[in-house]
Structures are given as C-alpha cells and as structure tokens.
Image (tube, rainbow, N blue to C red):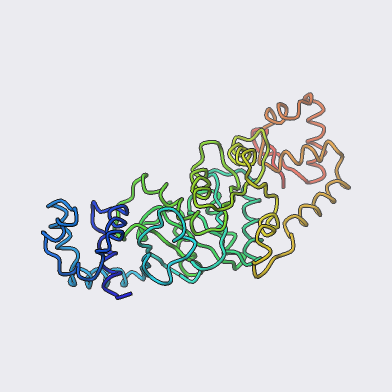
Amino acid sequence: MKMNERWILIALHETSGIGRKTISRLMRQGVFSQDMLHYNSRDWENHGFSVEQSNKLKQQISTSWIDKRKAEIESQGIQVLTAIDENYPVLLLESPEPPWVLYCRGRTDLLHSSSIAMVGTRVPTAYGRKVGTEIAKDLCSGGLTVVSGMARGIDSVCHESALVSAGNTIAVLGTAMDTIYPPENRSLYERIKDNGLLISEYPPGTASHPGLFPQRNRIIAGLSLGVLVVEADLRSGSLITTDAALEAGRDVFAVPGPITSPKSRGALGLIKQGAKMVISASDIFEEYESWLPKVIENTYNSKVQKATDVQQTDLTTEEFELYHVLEQGPFTLDELLQHSQWDFGHLHSVLLSLIIKMRITQLPGAIYKII
C-alpha cells in the first residue's frame, strides 16, 4: 500500500461532512487512489460531491496538507492505523462498520491479541467492583487482553485491575486522543498509554459531545472475542455494546447479581435472553480453551470457595445469609429489615453478632458494611 493512499484516506476521514458511508462508496467505485492528490474541484464533483465539499477536498487532499497533518499527529506521539493497512486488526475489520481510521497511543501489538471486553455501570456496587477486579485480573493472568471504554465505574475498575496485575488492556475512547474524559481518569489514561493501548476513531482536535460516546461501543465489541457485562441496569449503555457484539457475531457473557439490585437487572436480563452466565474467569476460558495459548486455574472461584468454607464454619446460617447480602454493598438498617423480613430484635441480634466477630462494621446513620 502506497503511503499517499493511506494519508488520502486519513484526509477524507478528517474532512468535515465526509462520513464513513461516503468513503465506502468511493472504495466500492474503485476510484480511490493516489491520483486524488491531483484532483481539481470538478473531479470531486464528478464523484458525487457538492461544490462546497469539492472545494474543501481540493484544499485538504494535497501533499502540503498531508505533510503538515502527519507532522502534527506524530508530534503528539500518536500512531495512525487505517483499514487499508496490512496490520489493521482482523477481528475489527470483520465487524460491521469498522472505523476507517484509528488513532493510537501505546502498544499497537495488543490490537492483534485475544481480547475480552468488560463493560458495566458507571456507578457500581461493592459487589460489582469486587467481581470486575477479580475477573479482569484472572482474564489477564490467562493471557487475554481486557478491552473497555475508560468510563467511570466498571470500565475503570477493569482497566485498573489489568494494570495492577501486569496484564494487557485496551481503552477505546469516546473522545479524540487529546481529550481525557472523565477528567479524573488522567492518571489512568497515562498508565494505559505507557503500559497498554489507547485508541480513538476521532481525529485529534475533535470537539467532544455526547453523541460520540455510543459509537465507540461497536469498536469495543469489534476488537473482542466476546463482551462480558459485569453489572448494569436496564438502561445501561453497556447494553449497546452487547447489541454490537451480537451484530458482529461475538459472544455475550453476563455476571449474575442480586435480583433485588437495580444494578443487576441488565445483566440478569441478558442471561434470560441466552447470554452465558459467568461467575469466574474459567467460564469464559472454557469457551476458547481449544485454541487459547494459556488457560488459568479458576483462582477467583477457589478464593470464593475458601471464603465460603471459612464463613460456614465460623458463622451461623443466618449470619452467613446476612453477610452474603452485605457483600453486595452497604445497607441501611431499614433496607436490611425489608430484605430479610426479620423482626427488628432478631435482625439487631444477628448484626451485633457479626460486629463482634469482626465481619461487619456499623457506620453513622445505621448503615452496615462488611470489613
């Protein structure tokens, strides 16, 4: 592939008013070539562009523009990958509507690794954080790359876990590469840049707006063998990613949660519709064990079993039942009364016993949480 052709594609991608459908049309017509560098306005009009678009394309698709833009992008430490490059990720190319251009910072080799997307609510419970952390770590230990969107909540939890465990992670941004959102993820952004991979389909300098974010979900799904929903409510944006996964023919997984928790309803709904239920990383590995290079022992499940063994020998049946409820996150006394259906005296007695055994603690406002 000649260098000029890929930069003509980048120039088209960065031209306001020119979308992926227009570029696809040019590709289908077989007119895409480096000859476009010499087109005048009439040539562009002959390919179906308006007078305004043709004048703009004549200015932008030129050797001088390419040289200037290439220098600007490289000065920011950004690598550009196009769909006509040989090293474009195969899985993504096979998905519906793959981006024509990807802007990357970090390890582009991760685009060719076996990946699982992990997504979920922006306001997770303690249960969601714990499960996301453990499964992300175990997936990385087994040789998989964790893909997510660097949003608040589950996305950030999974990226963090991958980094802490020295695993591989890819963040697909809903903004241009030079905009960090949410702002509090600046440190996470820098660590992924240094140890993982950041990608965006939006040219540097693109102004952020809410409409950009849903588009990145198809890339998250397209890069991955499957998508795991850790915790999500019925209106979670995570479900957009699972729709994209199904459209791309990828697997959909979901972590079950309490039927009383609104944060679990999206994942539970997916399971009812046929998504594979996941309680540990091994549930994902067994789907790919015939060809994955490395499959790990079910460390998360073994830790849960050990904890359960200890709890069952140390706690009464009712104490264990209440402790299991509090594993989902802090609860008020009124919420525990409603959940357990016990009378106040009995509930208070069980809570006091758990406090004495140093399994839970009471916070101001009659709120209880596990230690």
Residue 284 x/y as whole percent: 66, 56
Residue that appears at 28% across and 70% down:
5
292 and 170: which is toward the camera: 292
- Residue at 77 percent across and 45 percent down: it is 359
The image shows residue 323 at horizontal and vertical percentages of: 76, 41
Count of residue discs: 0
Name of the residue lying farthest toward the right:
313
- Give the side of residue 90 with respect to residue 226, left or right: left
278 w.r.t. 3: above or below = above
Q: Position of residue 203 (x, y in %)?
A: 31, 60
- 5 or 155: nearer the eye? 5
Q: Quadrant of residue 13?
A: bottom left
Residue at x 25% of width, y 60% of height: 12
Q: Residue furthest front?
A: 29
| Quadrant in which residue 339 is drawn | top right
Residue 14 in the image: state x and y as whole percent: 27, 59
Q: Quadrant of residue 330?
A: top right
Q: Nearer the viewer, residue 73 or 293?
A: 293
- Where, quadrant-wise, is the N terminus in this rendering? bottom left
* Residue 346 higher or lower than 286, as above or below: above
Q: Residue furthest top?
A: 343
